[in-house]
Image: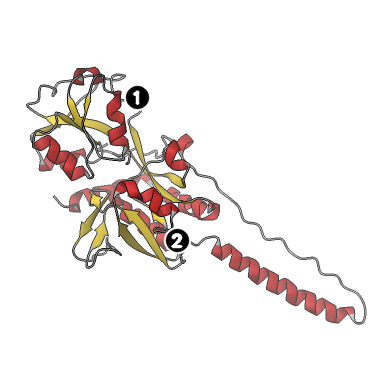
Amino acid sequence: MKKHPIQHVSGTFSRRDFLRASGITALTVGGMTVLTACGPAAQSSDASASSSSSTSASSDSASSDSLKLGDGKTLRVGMEAAYAPYNWQESSASDTTIPIENVDGAYADGYDVQVAKKIADALGMEPVAVKMEFGSLVDSLVNGQIDIICAGMSVTDERAQSADFSDSYIDDEVIMVVKQDSPYANSTKLSDFSGASVLGQKDTFYDDLIDQIPNVNHLTPVATVPLVVDGLMNGTCDAITFSSLSLPRLLKDYPTLKKVDLADGEGFTDASNPDNAAIAKGQDAVLAKINEVIDGISADERQSMWDDCMDRQPA
């Protein structure tokens, strides 16, 4: 699925810009040349002016249409609504939530939701969440069931073949977590986990990276992060892959767990895990506008948004 989080968000949010689709398209409307002459040509000039006005209005309309997603009114935001603090489900509305369109009486909150609200506002649309499994998001985007993905998803070469991705709006990192009394608790390199049973989330970068561990017992991934954590707590696995940014809350809720401190050069080849929005291909003007919104969120505001989500996410 994703790629995810560090306790302190970096002031730079473009660690993997070379993987991100961030093309910017400038729209230019050309003016018409009006011919003038004597006598009857004056009437022709009026008609030409009228035609020019009509063409300009048509061009303005086309420019407006190019900044629309879906029906231009309701922005359908695809997410799991089960991946706190990125996104989760609530039973009541608040200033930080949006309705979940396909779950009666439910609302979505989280960091992805706050960014989606900013994007919707810039596009003049009202956001609603559409709850679905993470692995279904890209196909649902391509099929038009949703208009945008804001779900803790990272751009990958494979995903970029089907959708266009924005710049990152927060950067995370994949880490390993074990129980404090685990025989792997003091591991310093991936090879120390040879023979260990390791669990990750289905259809995510967290699961993909597990194969970098030599001779690992790569367990069948599970659908959600809570199920990943349950696997570790219940003894189904020896270790899990997890979000660095989400670690503080995890350790608060489960004080018997700990992060594995892998030495430099002894961890995953590339554990960076940016959070990118995705839209259907061929909407360059919209993508440029989304990147403009993301660029306008300062490092301090990102940190504040993240901290607020960490504080109010469900246990």
Decide if residue 173 is in sight here. Answer: no
157 and 28: which one is in front?
A: 157
Residue 84 higher or lower than 41, as above or below: above
Please tell me which residue is depicted at 26% across the width and 22% down the height of the picture: 213
Residue at x 79% of width, y 78% of height: 47
Q: Amino acid at mark 2?
A: Ala
Q: Position of residue 109 (x, y in %)?
A: 26, 57
Q: Is residue 165 above or below residue 132?
A: above
- Which one is nearer the viewer's eye here, 229 or 61? 229
Q: Position of residue 97 (x, y in %)?
A: 27, 61
Local secondary structure at mark 2: helix
Residue 185's disc is none
Q: Is residue 267 above or below residue 132?
A: above
Disc 2 crowd, CA 10 A, few/some/many (<14, 14-19, 20+): some
Rendered image: mark on residue 269? 1
Q: Which residue, given by chain and number where applicable, does mark 2 sit on?
A: 122
